[in-house]
Amino acid sequence: MEVLRDAAQMHRRASALRAEGRAIGFVPTMGYLHEGHLSLLRTARRENPILAVSIFVNPTQFDRQEDLESYPVDLEGDLAKAAAEGADLVFVPEQKSMYPDRYGTFVEVEGLTRRWEGTYRPGHFRGVTTIVAKLFHIVKPHRAYFGQKDYQQACVITRMVRDLDMDIEVVVLPTVREPDGLAMSSRNVHLTPGERRQAPVLYRALGWAADQVRRGERDAPGLAEGMRRMIQEGTTATIDYVAVCHPGSLEPLETVEGPAVALLAVRFSKVRLIDNLVIDRH
Protein backbone atom coordinates (compact mmCIF):
# COMPACT_ATOMS: atom_id res chain seq x y z
CA MET A 1 0.00 0.00 0.00
CA GLU A 2 1.34 3.39 -1.01
CA VAL A 3 0.65 6.44 1.13
CA LEU A 4 0.89 9.66 -0.89
CA ARG A 5 0.74 13.14 0.61
CA ASP A 6 1.39 15.40 -2.36
CA ALA A 7 -1.39 16.17 -4.86
CA ALA A 8 0.94 16.28 -7.86
CA GLN A 9 2.47 12.95 -6.89
CA MET A 10 -0.96 11.36 -6.51
CA HIS A 11 -2.05 12.78 -9.87
CA ARG A 12 1.02 11.34 -11.62
CA ARG A 13 0.50 7.93 -10.00
CA ALA A 14 -3.18 7.81 -10.98
CA SER A 15 -2.44 8.98 -14.52
CA ALA A 16 0.12 6.21 -14.94
CA LEU A 17 -2.36 3.58 -13.73
CA ARG A 18 -5.02 4.84 -16.12
CA ALA A 19 -2.49 4.77 -18.97
CA GLU A 20 -1.93 1.10 -18.16
CA GLY A 21 -5.67 0.51 -18.52
CA ARG A 22 -6.21 -0.25 -14.82
CA ALA A 23 -9.55 0.92 -13.45
CA ILE A 24 -9.43 2.87 -10.19
CA GLY A 25 -12.14 2.53 -7.56
CA PHE A 26 -12.08 5.46 -5.13
CA VAL A 27 -13.48 5.97 -1.64
CA PRO A 28 -13.11 9.57 -0.39
CA THR A 29 -13.25 9.84 3.42
CA MET A 30 -12.53 12.24 6.25
CA GLY A 31 -10.93 9.44 8.22
CA TYR A 32 -11.81 7.85 11.56
CA LEU A 33 -12.87 4.85 9.52
CA HIS A 34 -15.72 2.66 10.76
CA GLU A 35 -17.60 -0.30 9.32
CA GLY A 36 -19.60 1.99 7.04
CA HIS A 37 -16.41 3.19 5.35
CA LEU A 38 -14.96 -0.32 5.27
CA SER A 39 -18.01 -1.68 3.47
CA LEU A 40 -17.36 0.87 0.72
CA LEU A 41 -13.71 -0.17 0.55
CA ARG A 42 -14.66 -3.84 0.24
CA THR A 43 -17.07 -3.22 -2.61
CA ALA A 44 -14.57 -0.99 -4.42
CA ARG A 45 -11.89 -3.63 -3.89
CA ARG A 46 -14.08 -6.32 -5.47
CA GLU A 47 -15.07 -4.20 -8.44
CA ASN A 48 -11.76 -2.58 -9.44
CA PRO A 49 -8.15 -3.61 -10.05
CA ILE A 50 -6.97 -0.58 -8.05
CA LEU A 51 -8.45 0.65 -4.77
CA ALA A 52 -7.68 4.26 -3.82
CA VAL A 53 -8.75 5.93 -0.57
CA SER A 54 -8.39 9.51 0.55
CA ILE A 55 -8.23 10.72 4.14
CA PHE A 56 -8.74 14.45 4.50
CA VAL A 57 -10.76 16.42 7.03
CA ASN A 58 -12.06 19.09 4.67
CA PRO A 59 -12.31 22.47 6.43
CA THR A 60 -14.51 24.15 3.82
CA GLN A 61 -17.52 21.90 4.51
CA PHE A 62 -17.75 22.79 8.21
CA ASP A 63 -20.01 25.69 9.03
CA ARG A 64 -18.81 25.81 12.65
CA GLN A 65 -15.14 25.94 13.63
CA GLU A 66 -15.77 23.93 16.80
CA ASP A 67 -17.14 21.03 14.72
CA LEU A 68 -13.98 21.00 12.63
CA GLU A 69 -11.76 21.11 15.70
CA SER A 70 -13.65 18.30 17.42
CA TYR A 71 -13.77 15.96 14.41
CA PRO A 72 -12.15 12.66 15.52
CA VAL A 73 -8.79 11.76 13.99
CA ASP A 74 -6.90 8.43 14.03
CA LEU A 75 -4.60 8.37 11.02
CA GLU A 76 -2.51 5.44 12.22
CA GLY A 77 -5.63 3.35 12.80
CA ASP A 78 -7.11 4.44 9.48
CA LEU A 79 -4.03 3.39 7.55
CA ALA A 80 -4.03 0.00 9.26
CA LYS A 81 -7.71 -0.53 8.37
CA ALA A 82 -7.15 0.58 4.76
CA ALA A 83 -4.24 -1.84 4.43
CA ALA A 84 -6.32 -4.67 5.88
CA GLU A 85 -8.99 -4.04 3.24
CA GLY A 86 -6.44 -4.19 0.43
CA ALA A 87 -6.08 -0.53 -0.46
CA ASP A 88 -3.42 0.13 -3.09
CA LEU A 89 -3.20 3.92 -2.71
CA VAL A 90 -4.06 6.15 0.24
CA PHE A 91 -4.01 9.87 -0.42
CA VAL A 92 -3.45 11.88 2.77
CA PRO A 93 -2.90 15.48 1.67
CA GLU A 94 -1.99 18.41 3.86
CA GLN A 95 -4.50 21.25 3.98
CA LYS A 96 -2.07 23.62 2.25
CA SER A 97 -1.80 21.13 -0.62
CA MET A 98 -5.55 21.20 -1.22
CA TYR A 99 -6.11 24.87 -0.39
CA PRO A 100 -2.94 26.83 -1.13
CA ASP A 101 -2.56 30.52 -0.36
CA ARG A 102 -5.06 32.76 -2.18
CA TYR A 103 -7.24 29.80 -3.09
CA GLY A 104 -10.47 31.14 -4.57
CA THR A 105 -12.24 28.57 -6.77
CA PHE A 106 -15.33 26.66 -5.66
CA VAL A 107 -17.84 24.27 -7.22
CA GLU A 108 -21.50 24.69 -6.35
CA VAL A 109 -24.59 22.67 -7.28
CA GLU A 110 -27.76 24.74 -7.20
CA GLY A 111 -31.28 23.52 -6.50
CA LEU A 112 -30.57 20.29 -4.66
CA THR A 113 -28.57 22.13 -2.02
CA ARG A 114 -31.12 24.76 -1.05
CA ARG A 115 -33.08 22.65 1.45
CA TRP A 116 -32.37 20.39 4.42
CA GLU A 117 -28.61 20.25 5.06
CA GLY A 118 -28.17 23.28 2.83
CA THR A 119 -30.40 25.31 5.15
CA TYR A 120 -28.92 24.18 8.43
CA ARG A 121 -25.27 24.07 7.35
CA PRO A 122 -24.62 27.14 5.18
CA GLY A 123 -21.77 26.58 2.73
CA HIS A 124 -21.53 22.88 3.57
CA PHE A 125 -22.30 21.55 0.13
CA ARG A 126 -20.08 24.09 -1.60
CA GLY A 127 -17.25 22.70 0.47
CA VAL A 128 -18.22 19.10 -0.27
CA THR A 129 -18.54 19.53 -4.03
CA THR A 130 -15.34 21.55 -4.23
CA ILE A 131 -13.21 18.99 -2.40
CA VAL A 132 -14.79 16.03 -4.19
CA ALA A 133 -14.23 17.68 -7.58
CA LYS A 134 -10.59 18.31 -6.64
CA LEU A 135 -10.15 14.74 -5.43
CA PHE A 136 -11.72 13.37 -8.60
CA HIS A 137 -9.26 15.42 -10.65
CA ILE A 138 -6.28 14.28 -8.58
CA VAL A 139 -7.14 10.60 -8.08
CA LYS A 140 -8.73 10.17 -11.53
CA PRO A 141 -11.11 7.32 -10.56
CA HIS A 142 -13.32 5.32 -12.85
CA ARG A 143 -15.78 4.68 -10.02
CA ALA A 144 -16.34 6.53 -6.75
CA TYR A 145 -18.18 5.04 -3.76
CA PHE A 146 -20.42 6.82 -1.26
CA GLY A 147 -22.79 5.74 1.49
CA GLN A 148 -26.53 6.34 1.42
CA LYS A 149 -26.46 7.69 4.99
CA ASP A 150 -25.53 11.06 3.48
CA TYR A 151 -28.42 10.82 1.02
CA GLN A 152 -28.53 14.47 0.02
CA GLN A 153 -24.76 14.55 -0.42
CA ALA A 154 -24.92 11.52 -2.72
CA CYS A 155 -27.61 13.24 -4.80
CA VAL A 156 -25.55 16.42 -5.02
CA ILE A 157 -22.36 14.64 -6.06
CA THR A 158 -24.22 12.57 -8.64
CA ARG A 159 -25.68 15.77 -10.09
CA MET A 160 -22.26 17.46 -10.13
CA VAL A 161 -20.74 14.53 -12.02
CA ARG A 162 -23.57 14.61 -14.54
CA ASP A 163 -23.64 18.38 -15.02
CA LEU A 164 -19.85 18.71 -15.39
CA ASP A 165 -19.56 15.70 -17.73
CA MET A 166 -17.15 13.92 -15.42
CA ASP A 167 -16.31 10.45 -16.73
CA ILE A 168 -16.91 8.82 -13.35
CA GLU A 169 -19.50 6.30 -12.17
CA VAL A 170 -20.92 7.29 -8.78
CA VAL A 171 -21.84 4.19 -6.75
CA VAL A 172 -24.12 4.71 -3.73
CA LEU A 173 -24.25 1.81 -1.26
CA PRO A 174 -26.76 1.13 1.56
CA THR A 175 -26.32 2.66 4.99
CA VAL A 176 -24.43 0.44 7.42
CA ARG A 177 -26.06 0.33 10.85
CA GLU A 178 -25.31 -0.75 14.38
CA PRO A 179 -27.30 -3.79 15.63
CA ASP A 180 -29.88 -1.44 17.18
CA GLY A 181 -30.37 0.47 13.92
CA LEU A 182 -28.29 3.58 14.54
CA ALA A 183 -26.52 4.63 11.34
CA MET A 184 -22.77 4.33 11.70
CA SER A 185 -21.04 7.69 11.85
CA SER A 186 -17.68 9.01 13.01
CA ARG A 187 -19.63 11.47 15.15
CA ASN A 188 -21.35 8.77 17.20
CA VAL A 189 -18.35 8.70 19.57
CA HIS A 190 -19.45 12.11 20.90
CA LEU A 191 -22.83 10.83 22.12
CA THR A 192 -23.19 10.51 25.86
CA PRO A 193 -24.24 7.04 27.13
CA GLY A 194 -27.78 8.31 27.63
CA GLU A 195 -27.93 9.86 24.17
CA ARG A 196 -26.55 6.67 22.64
CA ARG A 197 -29.42 4.73 24.21
CA GLN A 198 -31.91 7.22 22.76
CA ALA A 199 -30.42 7.51 19.27
CA PRO A 200 -31.95 4.31 17.77
CA VAL A 201 -35.34 6.07 17.98
CA LEU A 202 -34.32 7.87 14.77
CA TYR A 203 -34.26 4.67 12.76
CA ARG A 204 -37.41 3.38 14.44
CA ALA A 205 -39.19 6.58 13.37
CA LEU A 206 -38.04 6.10 9.78
CA GLY A 207 -39.13 2.47 9.86
CA TRP A 208 -42.53 3.48 11.24
CA ALA A 209 -43.06 5.85 8.32
CA ALA A 210 -42.10 3.17 5.79
CA ASP A 211 -44.48 0.71 7.46
CA GLN A 212 -47.32 3.25 7.37
CA VAL A 213 -46.82 3.76 3.63
CA ARG A 214 -46.91 0.01 3.03
CA ARG A 215 -50.19 -0.06 4.99
CA GLY A 216 -51.67 2.53 2.65
CA GLU A 217 -50.91 5.89 4.27
CA ARG A 218 -50.27 8.57 1.64
CA ASP A 219 -50.25 11.81 3.67
CA ALA A 220 -46.58 12.87 3.56
CA PRO A 221 -46.86 15.80 6.05
CA GLY A 222 -48.75 13.48 8.42
CA LEU A 223 -45.97 10.92 8.19
CA ALA A 224 -43.37 13.58 8.91
CA GLU A 225 -45.36 14.77 11.92
CA GLY A 226 -45.62 11.22 13.22
CA MET A 227 -41.86 10.76 13.00
CA ARG A 228 -41.33 14.11 14.69
CA ARG A 229 -43.55 13.05 17.62
CA MET A 230 -41.68 9.77 18.04
CA ILE A 231 -38.35 11.59 18.18
CA GLN A 232 -39.62 14.26 20.56
CA GLU A 233 -41.13 11.69 22.90
CA GLY A 234 -38.19 9.26 22.76
CA THR A 235 -35.14 11.54 22.89
CA THR A 236 -33.79 14.77 24.33
CA ALA A 237 -32.62 15.81 20.85
CA THR A 238 -33.53 19.05 19.13
CA ILE A 239 -34.99 18.43 15.67
CA ASP A 240 -33.60 20.38 12.72
CA TYR A 241 -35.90 18.78 10.16
CA VAL A 242 -38.04 15.74 9.45
CA ALA A 243 -39.47 15.40 5.95
CA VAL A 244 -40.83 13.01 3.35
CA CYS A 245 -39.49 13.97 -0.06
CA HIS A 246 -39.21 13.04 -3.70
CA PRO A 247 -36.14 10.78 -3.91
CA GLY A 248 -34.64 12.67 -6.85
CA SER A 249 -35.49 16.35 -6.41
CA LEU A 250 -35.66 16.21 -2.58
CA GLU A 251 -38.69 18.49 -2.70
CA PRO A 252 -41.18 17.78 0.12
CA LEU A 253 -44.19 15.72 -0.90
CA GLU A 254 -47.83 16.25 -0.09
CA THR A 255 -48.86 12.76 -1.17
CA VAL A 256 -46.77 9.59 -1.44
CA GLU A 257 -47.69 8.34 -4.91
CA GLY A 258 -44.46 6.47 -5.66
CA PRO A 259 -41.01 6.00 -4.16
CA ALA A 260 -40.06 8.59 -1.55
CA VAL A 261 -37.29 9.26 0.92
CA ALA A 262 -37.72 10.17 4.57
CA LEU A 263 -34.99 12.54 5.78
CA LEU A 264 -34.18 13.74 9.29
CA ALA A 265 -31.53 15.62 11.24
CA VAL A 266 -31.37 16.11 15.01
CA ARG A 267 -28.96 17.67 17.47
CA PHE A 268 -27.95 16.08 20.73
CA SER A 269 -25.74 17.99 23.18
CA LYS A 270 -22.45 17.57 21.32
CA VAL A 271 -23.33 15.90 18.05
CA ARG A 272 -25.67 16.30 15.12
CA LEU A 273 -27.03 13.12 13.53
CA ILE A 274 -28.65 12.64 10.14
CA ASP A 275 -30.43 9.60 8.76
CA ASN A 276 -32.78 8.62 5.97
CA LEU A 277 -34.76 5.74 4.55
CA VAL A 278 -36.00 5.19 1.02
CA ILE A 279 -39.72 4.35 1.17
CA ASP A 280 -41.55 2.19 -1.35
CA ARG A 281 -45.29 1.57 -1.35
CA HIS A 282 -44.77 -2.19 -1.88
Image (tube, helix red, strand yellow):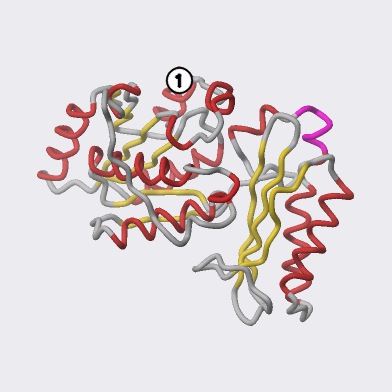
Q: Where is residue 201 in the image (x, y as percent from the top left)?
A: 80, 49
Q: Residue 111: x and y, percent? A: 45, 62
Closer to the camera, 251 or 146? 251
Residue 244, image x, y percentages: 66, 66
Q: How crowded is mark 1: few (under 14 residues within 10 Å), some or many (20 or more)?
A: some
Residues in magenta, as a range? 192-197
Dot 1 amino acid type: Leu
In the image, is 172 to the left or to the right of 142? right
Residue 48 x, y percent position in the rendering: 30, 48
Q: Which residue is drawn at 69% across and 53% down?
A: 241
Q: Which residue is drawn at 58% across and 33% down?
A: 186
- Say whether residue 224 is left or right of residue 3: right
- Secondary structure of the residue carrying tag 1 is helix
Taking depth in this image into account, of 65 and 266 the one nearest to the observer is 65
**Quadrant housing the C terminus:** bottom right
Q: Name the residue under label 1.
A: 75
Above or below 280: residue 263: above
